[in-house]
Amino acid sequence: MTKKFNLRDFLMTYGFNVVFVLILLFLSLSTEHFFTYENIATVLANACPWIVMATGIVLVIMSGSIDISIGSILFIAIITTNIAMLTQDINNLVGTNIPLAFLSGLGISVGIGIPIILFIGVLLGAFNGLLIVVIGINPWMATVGMMFVLRGLALWLTDARTQNIPPAMQEFGKIAYFKEFIIVISLAILLVMHFVVTRTKFGRQVMAIGNGEETASRLGVPTKRVRFATYVLSGLMVCAGGILQIFQIGNIHPRLGQGYEFTAIASIVVGGISLFGGEGKIFPGLLLGGLTMVIVENGLTHLGITPYAYPFVRGGIIFLAMYADAMKSRLLTRVHVMEEPELEEAKEGCE
């Protein structure tokens, strides 16, 4: 029997996809240079760091939790390691700041510095996991606290000064086809994370926890270990996205990472991934969500709208996305029924 078409269900499921297509059509028809190769490549390259950052926090959200500290994790990991990589004009930067003097004396290479940034992200993500999963602090309280502590510490350590990145990183960011390189790397990361969520036992366990931690625990899912791992991956991926971004902008300013968590969450929700956990797809959902946020700002630039309006528009998108997610959770049935093969796979994944 053919299922009757339900407009409400269609809009709740694909509404933002329809909006995405309409935005593209409107901007393509109303501006002369929007739908050109150069501008599309710029939009994709600018969206890629955001999408990579969001691939980490999306696992946390799919498990039914939250991480508000990703921007500050990115900031302290990158800015402190960058000082340790700088070798030119460092005396003007350091002044009488003893922590800066210590960091600047390390003189590490870019090849070592980039893995260190990722490692710091992993450590701070693990610390979040310790606070939330092991100690049992509320995720909102723990990560908001970490957000303020880490940003304040980084600003104190660095005197809140803008820093240039090492010359080798600046030159790499200027190579031919750099935009295409960033796009390929980011899509590869996105597809790997999509595979992890859809084709691995870990991904099934994350979704099971998001649909009900107590039920997942009864099925044998190691809930604490899986939730801890999601925070570790969140710290890793936000630093990976941050590295891609500083290659693009060429410096590190004191506002780096500020508000990133909300933009990432908005991209996730616009992409159809529920803030209540247990549902959603990284590909193409997260890809479309991240592109939407960047395309809107790029389109506003082409339309000649003042940049001061961007935060207002971004905030409006975040509000609408979260409102739509709340409506979806109330209107659509959110009962997940496991079929026998899925149940067996879940049990096997916990043995």
Image (spheres, rainbow, N blue to C red):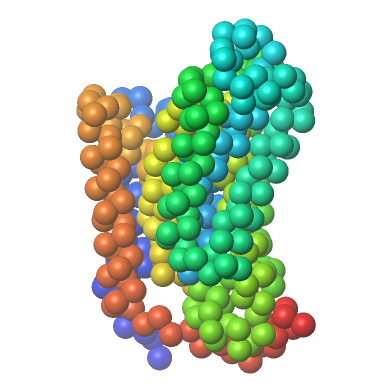
Image position, residue 135 (x, y; %): 57, 67
- Residue name at image x 51 percent, y 73 percent: 210
- Residue name at image x 34 percent, y 74 percent: 329
Image position, residue 146 (x, y; %): 49, 49
Give whichever of 154, 339 is nearer the camera: 154
Quadrant assignment, res 220? bottom right
Is 136 rendered above or below residue 122?
Answer: below
Is residue 198 at all visible to an observer of this figure? no
Total labels: the figure holds 0
From the viewer's perspective, is 225 left or right of 75?
right
Q: Which of the image's four quarters has the N terminus?
A: bottom left
Image position, residue 119 (x, y; %): 70, 43
Give whichever of 132, 335 is nearer the camera: 132
Is 94 rendered above or below residue 32?
Answer: above
From the viewer's perspective, is 16 left or right of 204?
left
Is residue 55 at all visible to an observer of this figure? yes
Quadrant assignment, res 174? top right
- Residue name at image x 34 percent, y 42 percent: 24
Give whichever of 177, 127 is nearer the camera: 127
Give whichever of 126, 27 is nearer the camera: 126
- Residue name at image x 48 percent, y 84 percent: 336
Is 85 rendered above or below residue 310?
Answer: above
Q: Which of the image's four quarters has the C terminus?
A: bottom right
Image position, residue 262 (x, y; %): 39, 48
From the viewer's perspective, is 49 left or right of 272?
right
